[in-house]
Image: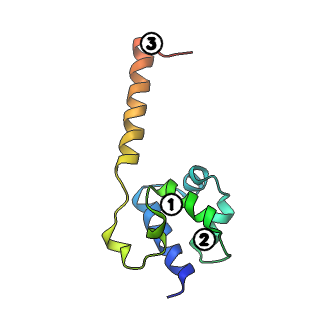
Amino acid sequence: MEIYQIVAQNVIRLRKALGLSQLKLATQAEITTGMLLDIEHARGNPNLATLSKLADALDVPLYILFDEAEKQAFPPSPMKGLVALLEKSLEEEKLEDGTAEI
């Protein structure tokens, strides 16, 4: 399998496992949705910086995007979603208590 197809499959699999839309992932990775679509469709030639941003946004080491064997072995970290949930909960508590900073 061509490396672009491996990267495409891994990005799609990890994005869906995290429950992220293409827009949300592109925003978190600070890339355009067009660039993400090209990567997910194995088109174009993304540079290492772009792939590194994607790996960071997906909360995985960069090599996971290239590794065909990692499809089953490396699930995305659940910590990212947990941290977001906790932050939201704390923010709501601050608003209820009236202790939110303005």
Q: Residues within 10 Å of mark 1 (few under 14, many from 20)?
A: some
For label 2, count other residues whose C-alpha is less than 10 Å away and answer few (under 14), some (14-19) or many (20+).
Answer: many
Residue type for callout 3: Thr
The amino acid type found where label 1 is placed reads Ala
Earlier residue among tags 3 and 1: 1
Which dot, 3 or 1, sits closer to the camera?
A: 1
- Report crowding for label 3: few under 14, some 14 to 19, many 20 or more residues within 10 A (C-alpha): few
| Residues marked 2 and 3 touching at CB (< 8 Å) | no
> Which residue corresponds to mark 1?
55
Residue position marked by numbered label 2 in the rendering: 39
Which residue corresponds to mark 3? 99
Q: In 3D space, how far apart are the residues under numbered discs 2 and 3 (Cα atoms)?
A: 44 Å
Q: Residue at point 66% right, 65% down? A: 35
What is the distance, in whole Å, between disc 3 and disc 1 at their CAs? 36 Å
Label 2 vs 3, first from the N-terminus: 2
Question: What amino acid is labelled 2 in the image?
Answer: Ile
Q: Looking at the image, how many numbered discs can be counted on the residues?
A: 3
Distance from the alpha carbon under mark 1 to that under mark 2: 12 Å
